[in-house]
Image (tube, grey):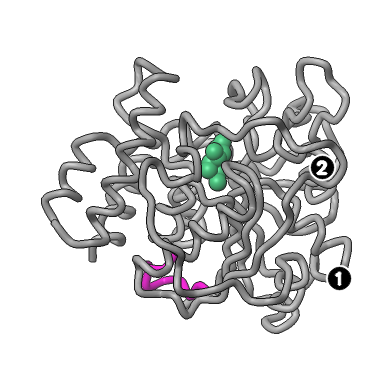
């Protein structure tokens, strides 16, 4: 079993990614850290605890992280049209019984990487503020971590939060640039591949047929997400499985095609602030710093996702 630590801004597709990772027999989730992004860090933490309770996995430690980006102010609003006011669509529940641990996320990441040297996979599916904070606290973790899989960026395709910028990177571009230049072993699962994946109303119908509390919860929250997607992307049948695809890459990297690239985050552009910019020139001789996913076997991934969640 591969040991993984998830960093999330739960969020509906984050919830699906947590369910996928916890249910996978290939992964051992040793902890989850939370951050702002889709919602406030307080809501993301509550939602994460809720999801773990739904999965009967409330023993997995949750560490609360950063409430705002490293340098620039927090954006004025969260994307409630996609994730709902508090992050899980219209789903509301009573206060979770479990509580986060007292260690803050950055310190928790450092602690866990040092506890499992060269063994731990980090799967980051929110803004990269917690990870940047961890690396600032203990730069040596970049050579002690086994791998870091990041859902973020749009390298050869359009952005989603901005013309060119993807939401996780745009939420804290300075943190992302710092992480990408840190020397850590990074695989980037961006919109280039995640927008090729899909979960649609037929999948939700199959969950409803299962009629278990978990399947009903997943169906309820995902229905909201699909409706949000249909408004933004009228030509699509359903929503994209952004964060679950990052988990899939940890489970089975053969699902994606990878290209090592020299990658930067634009921190100055008027129209491209937060854009992930790759040097695609043939004559580029600088050493690559990020493995970028450029292709995905979407159908094989989707089938594996459904099978794993419902087993
Ligand atoms: C990413 O942004 C968030 O809305 C999703 O949870 C995902 O992590 C997609 O751009
Ligand atoms: Ca996310």
Q: Residue at x 45, y 62 (%)?
A: 251
Query: Residue at the front extreme?
Result: 94
Location of the C terminus by quadrant is bottom left
Whole-Å distance between the Cαs marked 1 and 2? 18 Å
Is 286 inside the magenta-drawn segment?
A: no
Residue underneath mark 1: 140
Which region of the structure is painted magenta?
21-29
Q: Under 8 Å from ligand 2: the CB of mark 1?
A: no
Graded by Cα atoms within 10 Å as few (under 14), some (14 to 19) or many (20 or more), the crowding at tag 2 reads: many
Residue nearer the viewer, 13 or 251: 13
Query: Residue at the bottom extreme?
Result: 115
Height in image: 86 above or below 226?
A: below
Height in image: 263 above or below 270?
A: below
Task: State left or right for residue 144 relative to residue 217.
Answer: right
Residue underneath mark 2: 177
Quarter assignment of residue 95: bottom left
Height in image: 69 above or below 224?
A: below
Label 1–label 2 contact, CB within 8 A = no
Q: Under 8 Å from ligand 1: the CB of mark 2?
A: no
């Amino acid at each position: 079993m591969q040991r993984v630590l998830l960093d999330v801004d739960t969020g509906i597709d984050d919830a699906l990614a947590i369910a996928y990772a916890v249910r996978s027999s290939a992964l051992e989730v040793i902890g989850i850290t939370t951050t702002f992004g889709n919602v406030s860090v307080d809501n993301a933490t509550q939602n994460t605890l809720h999801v773990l309770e739904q999965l009967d996995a409330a023993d997995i430690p949750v560490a609360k992280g950063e409430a705002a980006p490293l340098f620039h102010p927090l954006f004025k609003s969260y994307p409630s049209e996609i994730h709902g006011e508090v992050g899980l669509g219209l789903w509301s529940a009573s206060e979770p019984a479990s509580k986060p641990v007292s260690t803050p996320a950055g310190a928790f990441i450092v602690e866990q990487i040092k506890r499992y040297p060269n063994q731990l996979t980090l799967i980051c599916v929110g803004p990269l503020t917690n990870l940047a904070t961890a690396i600032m606290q203990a730069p040596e973790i970049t050579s002690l971590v086994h791998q870091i899989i990041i859902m973020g960026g749009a390298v050869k395709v359009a952005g989603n939060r901005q013309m060119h910028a993807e939401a996780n990177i745009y939420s804290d571009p300075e943190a992302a640039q710092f992480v990408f230049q840190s020397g850590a072993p990074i695989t980037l699962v961006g919109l280039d591949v995640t927008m090729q994946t899909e979960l649609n109303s037929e999948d939700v119908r199959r969950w409803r047929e299962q009629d278990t509390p978990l399947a009903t919860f997943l169906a309820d929250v995902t229905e909201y997400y699909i409706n949000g997607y249909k408004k933004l992307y009228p030509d699509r049948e359903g929503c994209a499985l952004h964060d679950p695809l990052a988990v899939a890459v940890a489970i089975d990297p053969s699902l994606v095609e990878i290209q090592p690239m020299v990658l930067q985050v634009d921190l100055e552009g008027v129209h491209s602030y937060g854009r992930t910019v790759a040097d695609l020139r043939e004559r580029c001789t600088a050493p690559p710093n990020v493995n970028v996913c450029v292709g995905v076997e979407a159908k094989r991934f989707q089938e594996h996702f459904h099978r794993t969640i419902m087993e």
